[in-house]
Image: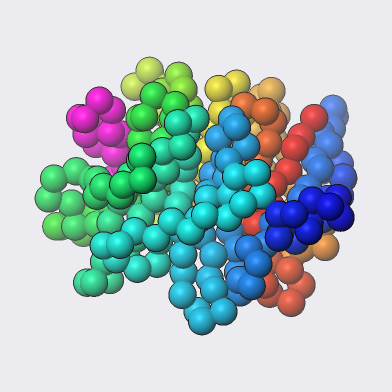
């Protein structure tokens, strides 16, 4: 581990704990990830090769997108704006996310073969791309001129609007290689809820007993990683695996957020330390 730290230039610390869940339990083994010199680091996505993407804030307070492969950090800043967030990456290394425009809006992008391209439905007032599968299908969200918020699917160059029935706003989520999607949405009370979108049917998949659930990503097996918020200002991650929910927290952390998952039983996300610093993490589960 010491050789890895010196070689990669990352702060890595692994610890194994059991998740709090109904029997049988899962074991999560955590690795903390911090971009060297950064004020904060968050990991949002991971592909099956273990390449991760996210964002960090440097010493000067500037936010950057980045990828992390074999321990090497590559800055990915869209030249058309500022504050780049990288949310998803597929097996070909295509990255999706969004950046802040000069008008302080959000603009979705696709980074592929060294080139950034703006994406999003026509006439959208804002957009965010949140996930991409190995076929290049993209799940995201966009705003319209009336102030509405909708999900979108970009597949083979065609945009499809995704609206969860009864939602005040649909915010997008993850997509796996079978085209199954997760959709986070806001209800009439503006609490976040989550649905599975499969075969044009929506099924609610909220974390039990928690008032807010964000289903961030889904893998080929149908495992889903979440962030959730409790009624008493508590925050944690959760995994839906084999039909059961398993809550998890990074050890010695305050708030934990689950964001990405791959087919090798690895999840990624971010957590706050007891001093309030945001750090990224990856965790394997078994």
Q: Is residue 90 left or right of residue 165?
A: right
Q: Total number of numbered labels?
A: 0
Q: Is residue 218 visible?
A: yes
Give the x, y percent position of residue 129.
Answer: 36, 46
**Toward which corner of the image does residue 131 lie, by quadrant?**
top left
**Toward which corner of the image does residue 38 lie, by quadrant?**
bottom right
**In the depicted structure, whether residue 73 falls above or below residue 164:** below
Q: Is residue 157 within the magenta segment?
A: yes
Q: Is residue 249 left or right of residue 105?
A: right
Give the x, y percent position of residue 225.
Answer: 60, 39
Q: Residue at x 35, y 30 (%)?
A: 137
Q: Residue at x 24, y 49 (%)?
A: 118
**In the depicted structure, whether residue 235 falls above or below residue 163:** below
Quadrant showing the C terminus: top right
Q: Residue at x 48, y 58 (%)?
A: 75
Q: How would you classify the magenta stretch by its main secondary structure?
A: strand
| Nearer to the camera, 31 or 127 | 31
**Magenta region:** 150-165
Q: Is residue 33 within the magenta segment?
A: no
Specify the farthest residue to the bottom. 60
Q: Is residue 166 visible?
A: no
Q: Residue at x 63, y 63 (%)?
A: 35
**In the depicted structure, whether residue 99 falls above or below residue 70:** below
Give the x, y percent position of residue 144.
Answer: 18, 53
**Toward which corner of the image does residue 46 lie, by quadrant?**
top right
| Nearer to the camera, 164 or 60 | 60
| Nearer to the camera, 44 or 222 | 44
Q: How is the image coloured?
A: rainbow
Give the x, y percent position of residue 13.
Answer: 82, 55
């Amino acid at each position: 581990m010491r050789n890895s730290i010196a070689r990669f230039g990352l702060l890595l610390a692994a610890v194994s704990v059991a998740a709090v869940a109904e029997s049988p339990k899962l074991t999560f083994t955590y690795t903390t990830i911090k971009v060297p010199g950064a004020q904060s680091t968050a990991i949002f996505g991971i592909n099956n090769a273990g390449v991760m993407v996210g964002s960090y804030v440097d010493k000067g307070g500037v936010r950057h997108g980045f990828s992390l492969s074999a321990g090497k950090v590559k800055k990915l800043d869209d030249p058309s704006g500022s504050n780049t967030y990288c949310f998803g990456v597929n097996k070909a290394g295509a990255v999706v996310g969004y950046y802040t425009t000069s008008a302080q809006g959000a603009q979705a992008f696709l980074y592929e073969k060294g080139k950034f391209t703006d994406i999003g439905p026509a006439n959208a007032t804002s957009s965010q791309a949140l996930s991409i599968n190995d076929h290049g299908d993209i799940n995201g969200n966009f705003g319209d001129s009336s102030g509405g918020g909708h999900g979108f699917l970009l597949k083979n160059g065609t945009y499809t609007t995704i609206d969860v029935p009864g939602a005040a706003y649909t915010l997008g989520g993850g997509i796996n290689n079978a085209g199954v999607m997760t959709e986070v949405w806001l209800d009439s009370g503006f609490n976040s809820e989550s649905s599975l979108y499969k075969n044009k049917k929506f099924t609610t998949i909220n974390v039990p007993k928690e008032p807010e659930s964000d289903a961030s990503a889904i893998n080929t097996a149908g495992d889903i990683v979440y962030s959730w918020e409790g009624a008493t200002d508590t925050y944690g991650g959760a995994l839906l695996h084999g039909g059961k929910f398993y809550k998890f927290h990074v050890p010695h952390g305050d708030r934990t957020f689950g964001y990405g998952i791959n087919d090798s039983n690895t999840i990624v996300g971010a957590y706050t330390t007891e001093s309030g610093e945001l750090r990224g993490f990856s965790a394997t589960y078994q």
